[in-house]
Image (tube, rainbow, N blue to C red):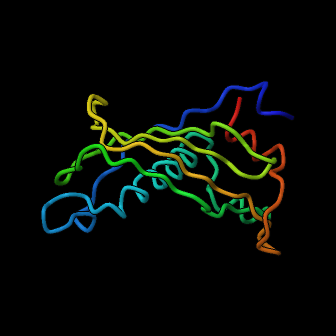
């Protein structure tokens, strides 16, 4: 089944900035931007699909982060909720998920960062890349 004939499912969630995410300037440390977007995807997945994310590994599949591009637009200052939005834009070669994302203020008016994540689907037994089965694609496209 080709994702070209389907619509991407938009993953949206509000994520809390934790005290441990802050540096001594009261800004979210740059390394935590990635954590915020990945956490939002996992939370959305569990909530919307009513399936624990671990069910993928139980079925023998996982995801390995192979590339990250983050464009920092403005600092996230202090403890607050951040609006995270992402979707799978394409699946290259049936096994690399290309995921553009944005992190914004909770009301969505100000952009903190945007970028692209690339995850490779892996076989948990061999730890090698593999083509994603249709049931995984159903979590990304309608």
Q: Is residue 99 left or right of residue 81?
A: right
Q: Is residue 67 left or right of residue 40?
A: right
Q: Is residue 12 left or right of residue 94?
A: left
At 22% across and 48% down in the image, what residue appears? 80
**Relative to the observer, which residue lies in front, 89 or 12?**
89
Q: Locate residue 84, reporting x and y percent.
A: 41, 42
Quadrant of the image occupied by residue 105: top left
Q: Quadrant of the N terminus?
A: top right
Q: Is residue 121 left or right of residue 12?
A: right
Q: Is residue 79 above or below residue 73?
A: below
Residue most toward the right? 1
Counting labels gives 0
**Relative to the observer, which residue lies in front, 85 or 60?**
85
Q: Is residue 138 above or below residue 46?
A: above
**Relative to the observer, which residue lies in front, 117 or 108?**
117
At 40% across and 54% down in the image, what residue appears? 36
Q: Quadrant of the C terminus?
A: top right
Residue most toward the left? 25
Residue most toward the bottom? 126
Quadrant of the image occupied by residue 27: bottom left
At 83% across and 43% down in the image, what residue appears? 134
Q: Locate residue 64, reporting x and y percent.
A: 65, 64
At 67% across and 39% down in the image, what residue appears? 140
Q: Locate residue 44, reporting x and y percent.
A: 52, 44
């Amino acid at each position: 089944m080709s994702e070209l004939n389907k619509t991407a499912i938009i993953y949206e969630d509000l994520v809390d900035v934790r005290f441990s995410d802050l540096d001594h300037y009261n800004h979210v440390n740059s390394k935590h931007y990635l954590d915020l977007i990945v956490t939002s995807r996992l939370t959305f997945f569990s909530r919307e699909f009513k399936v624990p994310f671990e069910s993928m590994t139980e079925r023998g599949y996982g995801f390995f982060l192979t590339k990250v591009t983050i464009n920092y637009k403005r600092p996230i200052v202090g403890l607050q909720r951040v609006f995270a939005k992402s979707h799978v834009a394409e699946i290259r070669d049936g096994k690399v998920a290309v995921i553009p994302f944005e992190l914004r203020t909770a009301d969505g008016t100000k952009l903190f960062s945007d970028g692209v994540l690339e995850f490779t689907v892996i076989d948990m037994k061999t730890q090698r890349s593999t083509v994603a089965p249709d049931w995984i694609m159903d979590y990304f496209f309608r």
